[in-house]
Image (cartoon, rainbow, N blue to C red):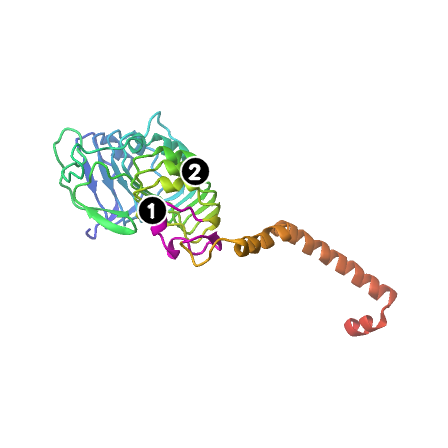
Amino acid sequence: MNRLNGTLPNTFSKNNLENLNLNDNRLEGPLPESLSNCMQLGLLNLANNQLEDTFPHWLPTLPYLKVLVLRANKLHGPIGIFKTEHGFPSLNIFDISSNNFSGPIPEDYIQSFESMKNIVQDEVVGNPQEYMLWPSIIAVDYSPTTVTTKGTSVPFRKIPTNFVSIDLSGNKFEGEIPNVIGELQALIGLNLSHNRLSGPIPQSMGNLIILESLDLSSNMLTGRIPTELVNMKFLEVLNLSYNNLVGEIPQGKQFGSFLNDSYEGNLGLCGVSLSVKCGEEHDQHFLWREDKFGFGWKAVAIGYGCGMVFGVVMGSFVFLIGKPEFLVRMFGG
């Protein structure tokens, strides 16, 4: 949180560096690959700079990396496949939001988040003293690391061991949400909003039973909201707005507490939580839109094209034979 500028030096050698916070500066250029020499690195926070690079393929080689925050830079391009056999086995916080990453959400990365698959239970429920411990030390007290959760930016000085979060929002990811996302049962927060994701919400998300915050807003998701999401009994924040979801909103447990703003911008949704109630009138409206016409935009385009060709041919024929005379006089001058 200074005014440091220029590029990061590519001169990191093998050492015991465990935490590196360079967030909120004016750093630019690529991420130095020599950081891969810092095998004890547990936290890397480079958020809110002007770094410009593709996703660093060497990051998964850091075996103890638990917190990775690259939010709000100029990182771009698709996230390629692993170049190592195992990657990110210890990662608990993965925040690459507000960049220009594109392509599909990398399924092999999601599957490699082994630490996110195991729910951590404190010996004493709600014990505030349980924190992430880095290698060879008892505790860590580093400069506050800001993490966005439940729609709010929260600065952590110590991060609880059970805080597990993924934030891919504000990028250009496209394609479907991978089904393997349901394997990350330790997730507390998941934000995939403001991308170009399409297809249905995976039913496997119902396995994220301790999830507290889910934001899938401002995408192009289709289909119904899976009833399996009702299993998220700790869900406090839900945002599915501005997609193309249809059908009745699931009821039960936490879903009864979410209001209109969780679903706005989905004209096909109905339910108790909305001003649009499900019933014969709603069903007929969307059946009329989807079934009565029985075709989509491709058929419409074909129809217009055929109609234009037919019109041009008939118009030429009318002028050729000179009849009917009133049309020839009206359009022929």
* Residue 203: image location, x then y, percent: 43, 38
Circle number at residue 203:
2
Residue denoted by label 1: 254
Magenta stretch, residue numbers: 249-272
Mark 1 neighbour class, 10 Å CA radius: few under 14, some 14 to 19, many 20 or more: some
Residue type indicated by callout 1 = Gln
Taking depth in this image into account, of 33 and 41 the one nearest to the observer is: 41
Residue 31 visible in this rendered orientation of the protein? no
Residue at 30% x, 39% y: name it. 210
User: Is residue 152 shown in magenta?
Assistant: no
Q: Counting other residues with Cα less than 10 Å from the Cα at mark 2, is it few (<14), some (14-19), or many (20 or more)?
A: some
Seen at 30% across and 46% down, the residue is: 71
Q: Secondary structure at mark 2?
A: helix
Camera-nearest residue between 34 and 125: 125
Q: How many labels, in total?
A: 2
Farthest residue in the top direction?
Answer: 85
Report x, y in % for residue 117: 31, 31
In this rendering, the answer to whether 240 lies above or below 13 is below
